[in-house]
Amino acid sequence: MSWIVSLIIGGIVGWLASIIMKTNAQMGLIANVLVGVFGAAIGFWIADALGLMVAGGVLRFGVALGGAVLLIFILRKLGFFR
């Protein structure tokens, strides 16, 4: 059950990140989920490397969203999005 919740929240995070980065028209459902899940992993990895303790639902959502935005930024620089 936790995997299903992670995929749903990952999809929401990826969708919001694609709206922020203006790549929403270029991304589908699967891309939004992948960007959300992997972007959240990147965000939490960076927060952990900086020694930040992420507690609370809103802060965790913000870190995940920030990581997804960063991932889209990197993918854009690599030429995946225009």
Image (spheres, helix red, strand yellow):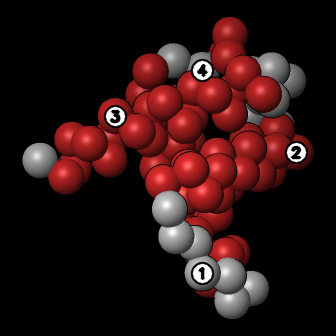
Quick check: 82 above or below 44?
A: above
- In primary-sequence order, the first of circles 4 and 1 is 4
Helix, strand or loop for disc 1? loop
Q: Give left or right: position of 13 versus 73.
A: left
> What's the distance in space between the residues labelled 4 and 1, CA to CA?
31 Å
The amino acid beneath tag 2 is Lys
Tag nearer the camera, 2 or 1? 1
Tag nearer the camera, 4 or 1? 1
Would you say the residues marked 2 and 1 are in contact, meaning their CB atoms lie under 8 Å apart?
A: no
Tag nearer the camera, 4 or 3? 3
The amino acid beneath tag 1 is Met
**Place of residue 81 in the rendered image (x, y in percent of width and height, measured from the top left):** 78, 28
Q: Give left or right: position of 37 versus 21.
A: left
Q: Which mark is residue 53?
A: 1
Residue tagged 3: 8
**Could you tell me if residue 58 is visible in this image?**
yes
**Place of residue 76 in the rendered image (x, y in percent of width and height, measured from the top left):** 82, 38
Residue tagged 4: 27
- In primary-sequence order, the first of circles 4 and 3 is 3
The amino acid beneath tag 3 is Ile
